[in-house]
Image: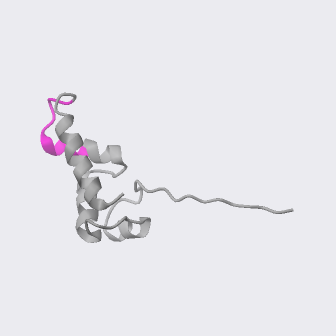
Amino acid sequence: MLMSQHMKDCKKEARVMKTSYPELCYVKRLDVAARKQGFSHYTDLRKAYKAIGPDKHPSDIELVMAGCAVSSPYQVLTKSITTS
């Protein structure tokens, strides 16, 4: 997913969550929405967006270099094959 789509989805989800979390301000709802996407909080998402750019699919290395937490929403898929 592009970084611009991550930001749009996060902001949209935060606006929709107003009925679910009326006691939280908009910034706190942004944090909750970013956590649902797999980022540790909205600040990490914003840092990654600024460092990587809006039109790129981020990799784990790019997210770490952008200053995001090590646990990113992108999981590395591995497969091992053994032959006998």
Q: What stretch is highlighted in magenta?
A: 21-31
Residue positioned 28% across, 67% down in the render? 55
| Numbered label tally | 0
Percent coordinates x, y for residue 34 in the rendering: 28, 48
Residue positioned 26% across, 48% down in the render? 9
Residue 15 located left or right of residue 80: left
Residue 28 located left or right of residue 82: left
> Does 49 sit above or below residue 36?
below
- Of 42 and 6, the residue lying toward us: 6
Residue positioned 15% across, 45% down in the render? 27
- Of 44 and 19, the residue lying toward us: 19
Residue 51 located left or right of residue 77: left
Q: Residue furthest right?
A: 84
Residue 53 is drawn in which quadrant?
A: bottom left
Percent coordinates x, y for residue 71 in the rendering: 42, 55
Quarter holding the C terminus is bottom right
Residue 56 is drawn in which quadrant?
A: bottom left
Percent coordinates x, y for residue 32 in the rendering: 26, 42
- Of 74 and 67, the residue lying toward us: 74
Quarter holding the N terminus is bottom left
> Does 74 sit above or below residue 52?
above
Q: Which colour scheme is used?
A: one colour
| Residue 82 belongs to the span the image colors magenta | no
Residue positioned 32% across, 46% down in the render? 35
> Does 66 sit above or below residue 35?
below
- Of 15 and 28, the residue lying toward us: 15
| Residue 29 belongs to the span the image colors magenta | yes
Percent coordinates x, y for residue 77 in the rendering: 56, 58
> Does 40 sit above or below residue 70?
above
